[in-house]
Image (cartoon, rainbow, N blue to C red):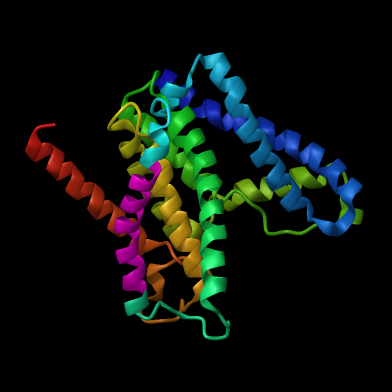
Amino acid sequence: MLKRIYYALVPLAVLLAVSLLACLLGYFLVQAVGDRFTLSKVISKTTLVFLVLSIFPAMARLKIGRSDLGFASGNLWLKQIPQGFALGLLILLPVLSAEYLLDIQSLDRAKEWTALLIARKMGLILLLSLLISLIEESLFRGLLIASLGRKMPPFAAIAVSALYYASLHFLHSHSTIPGEQADWSSGFRLLAEAFGNLFNAYNFPDWLALFAVGIFLGILRTRSSANLGLCIGCHSAWVWQIKMGKTLFDTHHNAEYGFLVGYYDGMIGWLVAGWLALFLLAYGVYLRVRGI
């Protein structure tokens, strides 16, 4: 049991290491570029770059190959992406439609859109969604599940991966420190604030929804040894729908059912968490009936 806890905490140690390094480097970067970027933004993006780069030495150290991450052979994983995208649309679209019908979301009529502008926006957001999903799935459903799965039962690895996935979305500070006021310790103060934000109960509905997302994608990933392409596609569909929703709609938290969405992006919250929980429960019943 203690060994499993130890292995579950190793990713946290890596995160702390790259975050501390980003705090130091962020200070020097802000001094170089001036006030064009806030210190918190520089540290956040630098930490992300370090996390992505850490995938490669971690794979070499743990002897994890492309197939261990869950990538199908050849170009098959690319063919899985549209299949996963369709699954993502099927799962999340009913929830977003319900939010509209419940008057939680309404069309933003202050913006003037043309068919060309909407098409261009859809294309750009789709590319961004695919990039985000490729990075996050390679890290959380790929590297984390592959490495943790060697040291603990599959579902425990999925749960730990989902815990990190959900929590990292809230690892940020709200303070802004101008470049000329920053010193070498400023980044560490922002880092302490960011970790403190993880325990803000205000974020719990959104965190729970993202945790459910992580569990779902983890189960999808482990149903076969080469399912990461499906996870990338499904994840990108969710990101695409949420970003398009934020672009086209206004969120009304003061509506009668406004409590069903949180404040992280105005789209996820109790409703998404409950819907995915029902989806996972139905899937569990299906497996039990089939004796799988």
- Please tell me in which quadrant of the rendered image residue 200 appears: bottom right
- Horizontal placement of 30 versus 120: left or right? right
Magenta region, residue range: 81-99
The magenta stretch spans residue 85: yes
Q: Is residue 211 visible?
A: no
User: Horizontal placement of 166 versus 52: left or right?
Assistant: left
Q: Residue at x 87, y 54 (%)?
A: 179
Q: Is 228 a magenta residue? A: no
Asked if residue 44 lies left or right of residue 261, the reply is: right
Q: Main secondary structure of the magenta part?
A: helix
Instruction: Relative to 89, say whether 152 is above or below.
Output: above
Figure check: 26 above or below 223? below
Image quadrant in which the C terminus is located: top left
In the image: residue 233, left or right of residue 62:
left
| Quadrant of the image containing the N terminus | top left
Please state which of residues 101 and 199 is positioned toward the viewer in this rendering. 101
Residue at image position (73%, 59%) is: 175
Q: Position of residue 273 (x, y in %)?
A: 34, 56
Q: Which quadrant of the structure image shows residue 48?
A: top right
Q: Residue at x 51, y 56 (%)?
A: 126
Residue 275 appears in the figure: yes
